[in-house]
Image (spheres, rainbow, N blue to C red):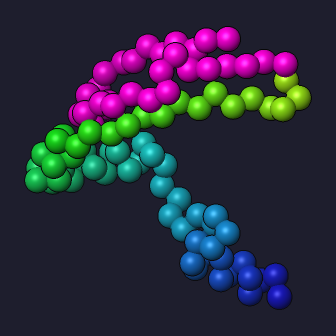
Amino acid sequence: MYAVCRMFCQATGFGGTVKEGRSVEEKMRQREENRDEAVEAAAAQRQITVSFNADVSDGMPWRFVPAQRSVKVQWHCARNTPWTLFWLQ
């Protein structure tokens, strides 16, 4: 029975099973090699929101709070601009 469940999960991606084993680096390299200028132009116009999470384990005596809860940036800037973020304790 295990083999049947495993085959199902591999075929469908059910349960978090990875269907495609390419890394982010491989995907980015493929995108650069096969650029679609219309897609790139549309993506450059998009604004994305980056949210910051400051969760800690319940057992830890720490409390972190991001100085900013989120930042809105243009997609092309997010890819090519270094950011400095501050956390308050």
**Magenta stretch bounds:** 61-89
Residue sitting nearer the eye, 12 or 77: 77
Residue at image point 38% right, 50% down: 27
The residue at the far right in this view is 59
Left or right: 20 in relation to 76 = right
The residue lying toward the viewer, choosing from 19 and 86, is: 86
Image quarter of the N terminus: bottom right
| Residue at the spot 56% in from the left edge and 20% down from the top edge | 66
Magenta segment: does it hold 13? Answer: no
Front residue of 3/40: it is 40
Q: Residue at x 75, y 29 (%)?
A: 56
Q: Residue at x 59, y 32 (%)?
A: 53
Question: Relative to residue 41, is residue 51 drawn left or right?
Answer: right
Locate residue 14, reporting x and y percent.
63, 73
The quarter holding residue 70 reads top left
Say left or right for 34 vs 3: left
Q: Please provide percent x and percent y for residue 15.
A: 67, 69
Instruction: Confirm whether the magenta stretch covers residue 68.
Output: yes
